[in-house]
Structures are given as structure tokens and as C-alpha cells.
Image (cartoon, rainbow, N blue to C red):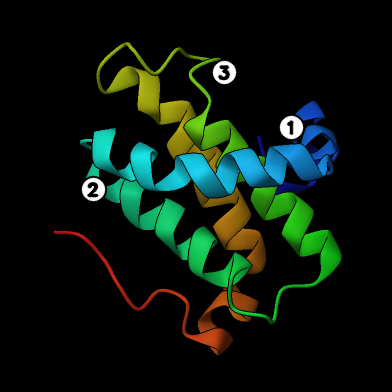
Amino acid sequence: MNADDFATSGWVKKAQDPQEEERIRSSFPRWIANVQNFDLINKGRQLWYYLNSGKCSTADRFLILGALLYLISPIDAIPDVIPVVGWLDDIGVATAVLAYLNNKISQCGSSRETVH
């Protein structure tokens, strides 16, 4: 899946609901605490920092919220309860959105914190 396909997905449409944004904002810290895949955490944080940077357009905001919603949701293409394999689709979505927004994200310095 590429970012353009994801942008027209049900996840991005769902992310346009203000209640979903609040759910993401309240659930994201817990999601980070539970995920053991550092690459996935780093990708999620990059999206999170750009979302909160104040430089994120409305269209980018919905794309990022959709990606974060996909990350924190246990219901997706490959269930997250399956170790390693369950995170591959999440990494793919986060990578596609990050690649799509790469220039904007690097300009705002939103990748300042990574986990090793």
C-alpha cells in the first residue's frame, strides 16, 4: 500500500472524526509503552511530532491521524497480537505515510527523539 492508497482508505476517513483524534491522543502514549518494536515506535513518534508541530496542514493531519489510528488499532490487515508479523503491516503504513511527508517532517525537526 502506498500513501495515496492509504489517503483514500477508510482509516483516513475515520480519522476525520474529532472523537477519533481524541482517542488517538489519549491512546498513543499507552501504545508506545506496549510496543516492543523500536522501528515501529520511531515511525509512530515521527508522525506524532509532525502532527503536533503546528506545521501540519489539514490534509496531512488527517493522513497522519489515519496512520496513527491504524498503528494503535488492534484490528488491521494482520492482527498485532501476532508477534513481529503483526507489526509488518503497521510498519508499512507508517513508512508509506512518512515517505510521503518526508520533506515536511524533516523541515520541522519532528524526528528529534528515537528509541534504540
Say whether residue 4 is left or right of residue 96. right
Q: In the displayed image of the protein, which residue is found farthest to the left? A: 116
User: Which circle marks residue 11 in the picture?
Assistant: 1
Callout 3 touching callout 1 (CB < 8 Å): no
What's the residue at 57%, 76% (across, down)? 105
Position of residue 20 relative to residue 109, above or below, is above
Q: Amino acid at mark 1?
A: Trp
Q: Amino acid at mark 3?
A: Asp
| Residue topped by disc 3 | 76
Position of residue 18 relative to residue 47, above or below, is above
What's the residue at 56%, 49% (across, down)? 25
Q: Amino acid at mark 2?
A: Phe
Q: Examine the image and state in which quarter residue 10 appears.
A: top right
Q: Nearer the viewer, residue 34 or 23?
A: 23
What's the residue at 35%, 78% (across, down)? 112
* Mark closest to the chain's N terminus, 1 or 2: 1
Q: Residues within 10 Å of mark 1 (few under 14, many from 20)?
A: some
Residue 58 percent coordinates (x, y) = 84, 65
Residue 39 percent coordinates (x, y) = 29, 49
* Mark closest to the chain's N terminus, 3 or 2: 2
| Residue topped by disc 2 | 38
Cα distance in 3D space between marks 3 and 2: 20 Å
**In this view of the protein, can residue 46 be seen by the observer?**
yes
Position of residue 30 relative to residue 73, above or below, is below
Element assignment for label 1 = helix
Q: Nearer the viewer, residue 41 or 2?
A: 41
